[in-house]
Amino acid sequence: MGYKVVVVGATGNVGREMLNILAEREFPVDEIAALASRRSLGTEVSFGDKTLTTQDLDRFDFSGWDMALFAVGSEATKQYAPRAAKAGCVVIDNSSLYRYDADIPLIVPEVNPQAIHGYAKKNIIANPNCSTAQMVVALKPLHDRAKIKRVVVSTYQSVSGAGKDGMDELWDQTKAIYNPVDDKPPSKFTKQIAFNVIPHIDVFLDSGETREEWKMVAETKKIVDPSIKVTATCVRVPVFVGHSEAINIEFEDHLDEDEAREILRTAPGILVVDKREDGGYVTPVECVGDYATFVSRIRQDSTIDNGLNLWCVSDNLRKGAALNAVQIAELLGREVLKKG
């Protein structure tokens, strides 16, 4: 016996990826519905070897459905997620709307699976920010061994994190570089993204940090440990898919780089590719389509007593969004609903 599953926002990048991953991982589905806004109504999407026709989100009755994976913005989520939850359908939400609600668990299954049982308070589970998800997968096994005091992270985030419009803008501007007549000024981003980097993701806060940077701080504390100090600089780079992060970690206890490497090799969801030679590391192009979070460049930081540096790369549409949501669905089924 399987589950009745809804994918909300099925025509977007993340929604389509959710459908792909549900099929790839052979999630026990008895029935599946693909929902979209009225402007995308009737669009066909793939689910394994099946083709689904999108249904109208506004008119859909969530009663009798087990879980709904939401891949729409916060405004639509605010309107429809409570409706689904009230109907008894567990919501797994990819937006930022519920991440900081104390009554809603924020889950990365490799890191804090025990939090799944908190879903019952509101029948909603939050999926973390893409940049946070891959980082905490790498931090947690190291934290368990040596206790992390402070993290300094710089991100190199792909344009797919800004949706299809971001990917289109990079593509159009790249072509326009070689055809000056066809000028493509910025519209999705604040400055030209082609052949450039932009140290600005989401809105600026009074503190001077961006909301994307604030998210990494708040979410790491909620998922891993509230005592960890985090400071982040988040940068958009001209890469289509795949987020990269340079992470500096300060521990309470000494952790040798060789031991850290072995800990990460055996940690769930991580693949270590760390050879001190040309090409002995992973880049965003190589992680696309993969489930894993890749860790490279593991080395001691000699400027502090108990420090390590590492390089972390992951497909943001997968681990940073769709894969994590499906893993939450698997965890929910296995630990709570127990039908599959």
Image: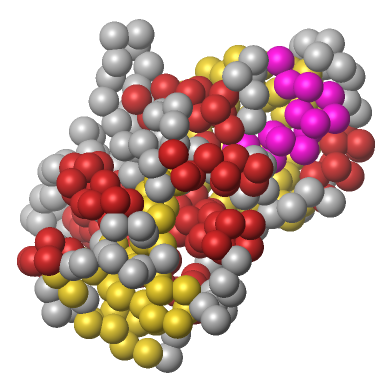
Q: Main secondary structure of the magenta part?
A: helix
**193 versus 256 height, above or below:** below
User: Horizontal and vertical percent for residue 189?
Assistant: 23, 39
At a point 60% along the width and 19% down the height, the residue shown is 226
Q: Is residue 130 left or right of residue 177?
A: right
Q: Is residue 261 left or right of residue 236?
A: right
User: Horizontal and vertical percent for residue 93?
Assistant: 38, 49
User: Horizontal and vertical percent for residue 319?
Assistant: 53, 54
Quadrant where the C terminus is found in the figure = bottom right
**193 versus 301 height, above or below:** below
Q: Which residues are magenta?
A: 133-149
Q: Is residue 2 left or right of residue 307?
A: left
Would you identify the image quadrant in which residue 126 lies? top left
Quadrant where the N terminus is found in the figure = bottom right
User: Horizontal and vertical percent for residue 120?
Assistant: 47, 45
Q: Nearer the viewer, residue 205 or 51?
A: 51
Is residue 169 in sight in this rendering?
no
Would you identify the image quadrant in which residue 34 lies? bottom left
